[in-house]
Image: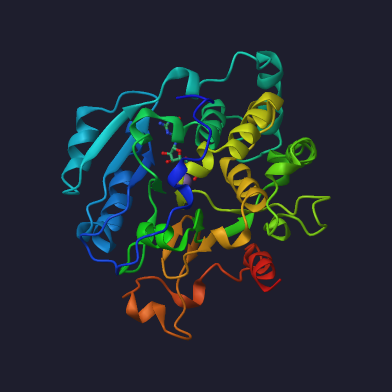
Amino acid sequence: RGQGHASIPEDYYSAAPTSNATNTERANATFVFLARNSDLSGVIQSMRDAEDRFNHKHNYPWVFLNEEPFTDEFKKRVSVLTKAPIEFGLIPKEHWEQPSFIDVDRATESRKKMEQDNIIYGGSLSYRNMCRFNSGFFYRHELLQKYRYYWRVEPDVHFHCDIDFDPFLFMQREKKVYGFTIAIYEFEKTIPTLWNAVKEFAKAHPQYIANDNAMDFVSDTAGETYNLCHFWSNFEIADLDFWRGDAYSAFFDFLDQKGGFHYERWGDAPVHSIAAALFLPRQDIHFFNEIGYEHNPYTHCPSTAGDDKWTKGRCACDPNRSFDYDGYSCMRQWDRVNAA
Ligand code: GDP
Ligand code: MN
């Protein structure tokens, strides 16, 4: 499905179920895991944590995506880790490769320069393809069409606590659209012209900007400048219909035409985050405080304060080393949004 599939389905605002969650009540949801065959050992680590801490009680399916076919070895090694259904999908070339409207020489030149500037992944074409895919294409993959919610997982992450509730049912019941565990600053050199593009889009399409939005999460100047804050998208639990909807579809196409995924190194994290912050009412975005999560080098570890989520969750992380109020964290900006 392409751009045509952009309208929000009729049942989007229908009432969420009212009964209490049980292990048999399920949301229409899946894990989604983009990976290379060479990521196998890290994939196993992440999947094992997700299964042990949550999914062995729920058996939500797993969807693995790759622009190359997964090897039999890969399929065999991940298949033993879950009782849930697993599907392996091939990403179509037109969802992955540098699009034809990109000036190849300009893109190559820019990678060279960013590599010399020691910008992380600055010289990598595949990393750019990956960021563009995660920004605008993963939710269009045929294997994801039947699902409403997804949980993104990456290699070598850790889920440090028991997850004794169903985050998908929570999203559904509370009508949440985007869920995160870590908020952090972006490297400015990867996105020098992104905010100008965002402002241009917002000016041309004011109807997409939500009234009660979270602009103050991404801007300290009421939208004039980007403060580099974003939700760290290696963890995401979100509603696929948001990406499939009119606002985000138009936004992605607009950004894509600017070429910034390849001329600069726009990440899917700032792109997703800016869209969520501008197009959603702020209460549609949820911080999953009780989900202990680590992606090198940062960890969100639940606190022992208040209702002691750390003890309840049998957490294996150090609560004194949670990233939340580290100097490089954007939780302060998130709190500011919520306090407003
Ligand atoms: P980082 O977290 O930004 O350092 O980047 P990662 O190396 O973890 O890549 C982000 C995600 O994209 C992970 O799930 C990787 O497995 C996946 N990924 C990165 N590059 C490629 C690629 O070239 N092909 C495929 N199939 N997956 C990739
Ligand atoms: Mn990663």
Q: Nearer the viewer, residue 63 or 40?
A: 63
Where in the figure is residue 1, as x and y percent of width and height? Answer: 44, 25
- List the single residue furthest toward the bottom: 306
Q: Residue at x 29, y 50 (%)?
A: 47
Where in the figure is residue 181, as x and y percent of width and height? Answer: 50, 61
Where in the figure is residue 42, as x and y percent of width and height? Answer: 34, 46
Looking at the image, residue 307 lies above or below residue 199: below
Q: Which residue is drawn at 27% across and 55% down?
A: 26
Residue 169, image quadrant = bottom left
Looking at the image, residue 244 lies above or below residue 2: below
Residue 57, image quadrant = bottom left
Q: Residue at x 79, y 59 (%)?
A: 220
Q: Count how many numbered circles sit on residues in the image.
A: 0
Q: Which residue is drawn at 76% across and 39% down?
A: 192
Looking at the image, residue 233 lies above or below residue 158: above
Colour mode of the rendering: rainbow
Where in the figure is residue 34, as x and y percent of width and height? Answer: 39, 37
Q: In which quarter of the image is the C terminus?
A: bottom right
Image position of 188 (left or right of 45): right
Residue 175 in view here? yes
Image position of 223 (left or right of 92): right
Residue 40 in view here? no
